[in-house]
Image (cartoon, rainbow, N blue to C red):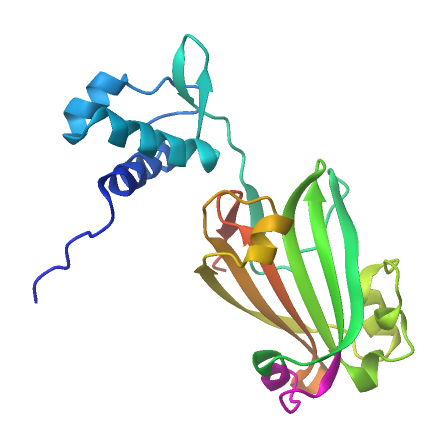
Amino acid sequence: MARRADERPPYEQMAADLRARIMAGDFAPGTQLPSTAYLVDEFGVSNTTVQKALAVLKGEGYLTSRQGKGVFVRERQPFRVEADTYFEPTPGGYSYELLEVAEVPSPTEVARALDLEAGDPAQMRRRLLRHGGRPVEVDWSYYPLELARGTDLAGQRRIRGGAPRVLEELGSPQRHHVDAVTARMPTTEEAELLSLPNVPVIRQFRVVYTDGDRPVEVSILIKGSHLYELQYHQT
């Protein structure tokens, strides 16, 4: 079978190549990129194409311009998400902003995961995670209404000790969870909340289970892909 040709515009192809080399360490943080003339010759493209490719990578946070000096690889320290642990903010500069708490019709995939009928009401909490004041994640958490109604899960304020503490007190402690991780382009709401450049997001669809493999929480966590890396440990 013939290999499908790359149909992206030349500047996107060039940006993808440079991005891969930066991520691989070929261009270390603080390194000056080759001159425009060099890149024109290396990639066989026009000056305009080079500038458009560099603009993409600047927007994604990979490159920065220094007036009178050139284009340099930015220092980037991605946030590491331990995929086999329950990701909660730590004191190291993280803070949560509670955006919304409401009873809502459960989306189809959420209802399926919680053993509800599509459209059945669920308790929803929407939050924005910041690091050093910068928005880095937005998440939606859903709980069966019969479990959450009248508890702190339905309260219009942050929960001291988090949802795990409430679930423990309700006799439904978190025993394990299953993550489905995908990547896609952000919705307008996600792009605006997270101040994203033109990059995909990492989407974690997490189902939390209590005793007897009963689902008690579904969380949808959205993160800018340019800020995070996922780590998996095999034991």
Residue at point 88%, 60% (across, down): 157
Residue at point 54%, 34% (across, down): 77
Q: Quadrant of residue 173?
A: bottom right
Q: Quadrant of residue 2?
A: bottom left
Q: Is residue 232 visible?
A: no
Look at the image and give the residue range highlighted in magenta.
111-122
**In front here: 162 or 110?**
110
Q: Is residue 77 visible?
A: yes
Query: Residue 16 location in percent, x, y?
Result: 30, 41
Along the horizontal axis of the image, is 200 left or right of 111? left
- Residue ranking furthest to the front: 48
Residue 115 within the segment the image draws in magenta: yes
Query: Residue 60 location in percent, x, y?
Result: 46, 38
**In front here: 206 or 109?**
109
- Residue ranking furthest to the bottom: 117
- Residue ranking furthest to the left: 2
Query: Residue 87 location in percent, x, y?
Result: 66, 56
**In front here: 142 or 166?**
142
Q: Is residue 111 above or below residue 8?
A: below
Along the horizontal axis of the image, is 235 left or right of 46? right
Along the horizontal axis of the image, is 51 left or right of 107? left
- Residue ranking furthest to the right: 150
Residue at point 21%, 19% (across, down): 38
Q: Is residue 22 above or below residue 163?
A: above
**In front here: 43 or 181?**
43
Q: Is residue 103 above or below residue 190?
A: below
Residue at point 55%, 58% (across, down): 83
Query: Residue 188 location in percent, x, y?
Result: 56, 56
- For the N terminus, which image quadrant? bottom left
Count the labels in the image: 0
Residue 136 within the segment the image draws in magenta: no
